[in-house]
Amino acid sequence: MVCIRQATVDDLIAMQTCNLWCLPENYQMKYYFYHILSWPQLLYVAEDYNKKIVGYVLAKMEEDAEVPHGHITSLSVLRTHRKLGLATKLMRAAQSAMAEVFDAEYVSLHVRKSNRAALHLYTQTLGYQVNGIEAKYYADNEDAYDMRQILQPEKYNKRSKKERGDKFPDPPAGEEDKKEEKKEESETSS
């Protein structure tokens, strides 16, 4: 059995070890400390029955942003524990905390264009959309998809595309009102 819980300072070395085993992008320990000191509510680990950290999500809030939003810095699950839904659970925990604690309207992340497994997780399982491409984003010059998931559509959709800084299509005029009307109708008819 594996449990998802909020990370503590005592987990940072195990999180970094998991990162070193799984990902080509690695971070110095001071970066992990910066995250846990600044946004302790947004770091989660997957811990197995032997108290071993088998996955983590490292997340943050974008500082000085016009629209409050979070960012997934790093997500990793050891190969021995993949295909168990742990990445999904870690992501959902961080995303929920972003919205509830920091009132984030959306969450962003970058993913290698070649990482098909991660792209499937983000688009098919978690509902992210590609917002753009960051050319030569990674140290080896591979491009990254800039991806977003809206956490609070009622707030997010009230902003202009320029305010949001995104390339998502705007909902058709009145579409949100129609959804609300249908919701209210179904609630009153039950």
Image (tube, rainbow, N blue to C red):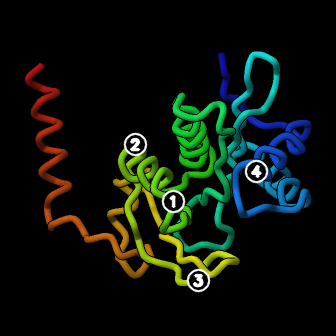
Tag 4 secondary structure: helix
Check disc 4: other Cα within 10 Å, few if <14, some if 14-19, many if 20+: many
Q: Residue at x 67, y 78 (%)?
A: 140
Is residue 10 left or right of 65 when viewed as pictured? right
Residue 160: x and y in percent read: 35, 76
Which amino acid, mark 2?
Thr
Check disc 1: other Cα within 10 Å, few if <14, some if 14-19, many if 20+: few
Image quadrant where one finds the N terminus? top right
Which amino acid, mark 4?
Asn
Tag 2 secondary structure: helix
Gap between marks 1 and 2 measured at Cα: 15 Å
Q: Nearer the viewer, mark 2 or mark 4?
A: 4
Q: Residue at x 50, y 52 (%)?
A: 118
The residue singled out by tag 1 in the image is 115
Gap between marks 3 and 2 measured at Cα: 26 Å
- Chain-order first, disc 2 or disc 4: 4
Gap between marks 2 and 4 measured at Cα: 22 Å
Image quadrant where one finds the C terminus? top left
The residue singled out by tag 3 in the image is 136
Q: Nearer the viewer, residue 53 or 149?
A: 53
The image quarter containing residue 130 is bottom left
